Amino acid sequence: MKPKNNFAFSHPLLLLLLLLLLLSFTCFSPTFCVANDTITSEIFIKDPASLISSSSSFQLGFFAPPNSTSRYVGIWYNNIPSQTIVWVANRENPLKDASGIFTISKDGNLVVLDGDDTVLWSSNVSSSSKTNTSARILDSGNLVLEDNASGKILWESFKHPSDKFLPSMKFMTNTRTKEMIKLTSWNTPSNPSTGNFSVALEVVSLPEAVIWNNDDNVYWRSGPWNGQSFIGIPEMDCVYLSGFNLVIQNQEYTFSVPQNYSVEEFGSLFLTSQGNFVQSYWNPQERNWNFNWIAIQTV
Ligand SMILES: *[C@@H]1O[C@H](CO)[C@@H](O)[C@H](O)[C@H]1NC(C)=O
Ligand SMILES: *[C@@H]1O[C@H](CO)[C@@H](O)[C@H](O)[C@H]1NC(C)=O
Ligand SMILES: *[C@@H]1O[C@H](CO)[C@@H](O)[C@H](O)[C@H]1NC(C)=O
Ligand SMILES: *[C@@H]1O[C@H](CO)[C@@H](O)[C@H](O)[C@H]1NC(C)=O
Ligand SMILES: *[C@@H]1O[C@H](CO)[C@@H](O)[C@H](O)[C@H]1NC(C)=O
Ligand SMILES: *[C@@H]1O[C@H](CO)[C@@H](O)[C@H](O)[C@H]1NC(C)=O
Ligand SMILES: *[C@@H]1O[C@H](CO)[C@@H](O)[C@H](O)[C@H]1NC(C)=O
């Protein structure tokens, strides 16, 4: 039996018209045409709106930590049911209500504003006439502020981390310029303001990871890098998760993690508010965070 010919969908001209009609509902309407991962001076987010990275790995928006009513702009995993914050913007200056706005200011910086337009946080890039900028949340979890004209990255959250190191970040220390990328703990699990602990790569003769308590007291040392792992974290060498890397170039020491896992499978290197440095990954069966290793003070 010959199937019934549906004229409307078989005729190329009509199909084109139908497509154009569809497009007019999507792309000519400003709220739908914009990418959902981008902020500009005109397209900003207001609490409780959020952005989602292009392949939906991360979400950026407003959140309140557990047992807190203070609100912050942060980034979390989009595909993990228990909200896990990987980065916080206004960690020292919470919003007291749901009036927050995350936008690009006149000087081209990313800013968190409260209901009175008070700046609670800024990306603080010196305003060298970079007024034509936009910001995007990437699938790596990195929030980047770009100069529209040159495409140059002016600022990125991966260079200003909070308490978690994500797989595409570079844990970097430059012994010449003294530049150092540090994680800093939250004060408590309910309060993301800067806590007592920080961790970074320190280079005396050999590079090692060091946790400081209150900035200058060494709390824990990983032991030197042996080419595959830090000798004080033997669990790093486990077959299941090998591929950590440390590259030295022009006095710049850069540590990176295996790149062949999804962001959820690898999880993060996480400095807890008690000063423990853990590698936690998402276990989809248990629907929970598990740990591959925990570096803690043993004395
Ligand atoms: C953008 O993402 C948010 C958060 O999930 C969603 O509510 C909104 O509908 C999305 N907007 C568009 C234009 O896709
Ligand atoms: C931005 O710069 C101002 C002035 O130098 C400083 O007080 C503020 O803490 C900086 N904010 C951030 C988020 O670095
Ligand atoms: C910068 O680029 C974004 C994305 O292409 C665009 O939406 C925005 O309007 C641009 N900003 C300016 C000031 O032209
Ligand atoms: C911003 O940059 C875009 C891309 O280079 C350019 O087309 C646009 O004219 C610029 N806008 C302003 C306000 O300078
Ligand atoms: C929040 O409060 C409940 C009840 O007091 C407590 O069991 C839980 O551990 C708290 N969570 C955090 C993150 O502090
Ligand atoms: C942080 O250090 C201060 C000063 O030593 C101490 O009073 C406070 O209890 C510490 N907080 C945490 C969470 O360890
Ligand atoms: C990732 O690479 C490491 C080292 O080559 C390997 O042992 C591991 O099985 C790989 N994992 C995945 C999920 O591909």
Image (cartoon, grey):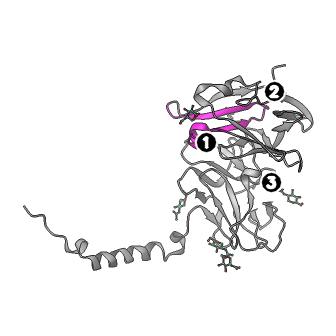
**Residue 83, quarter of picture:** top right
**Label 2 Cα crowd, 10 Å radius (few <14 / some 14-19 / many 20+):** some
SS type, badge 2: loop
Q: Distance between the residues labelled 1 and 3?
A: 34 Å
SS type, badge 1: loop
Residue at image point 79% right, 32% down: 275
Determine whether, in the image, residue 27 is placed left or right of residue 59.
left
**Residue 42, quarter of picture:** bottom right
Q: Is residue 1 magenta?
A: no
The quadrant of the picture showing ligand 4 is bottom right
Residue at image point 74% right, 65% down: 115
Observer-side mark, 1 or 3, equals 1
User: Which residue range is magenta in the image?
Assistant: 257-285
Q: Which of marks 1 and 3 is nearer the N terminus?
A: 3
SS type, badge 3: loop
Residue in front for this viewpoint, 39 or 102: 39
Q: Which of marks 2 and 3 is nearer the N terminus?
A: 3
**Residue 235, quarter of picture:** top right
- Of all residues, the one furthest to the top in this rendering is 299
Residue at image point 64% right, 28% down: 292
In the rendering, at what x and y percent does residue 150 appear?
70, 71
Determine whether, in the image, residue 265 is placed left or right of residue 44.
left
**Label 3 Cα crowd, 10 Å radius (few <14 / some 14-19 / many 20+):** some
In the rendering, at what x and y percent does residue 19 appear?
36, 74
Residue in front for this viewpoint, 34 or 169: 169
Query: Which residue is denoted by mark 3 in the rendering?
Result: 93
Q: Residue 223 carries which label?
A: 2
Q: Is residue 113 visible?
A: no
Q: Residue 245 carries which label?
A: none
- Of all residues, the one furthest to the left in this rendering is 1
Q: What residue type is labelled 1?
A: Gln
Q: Which amino acid does label 2 sit on?
A: Gly
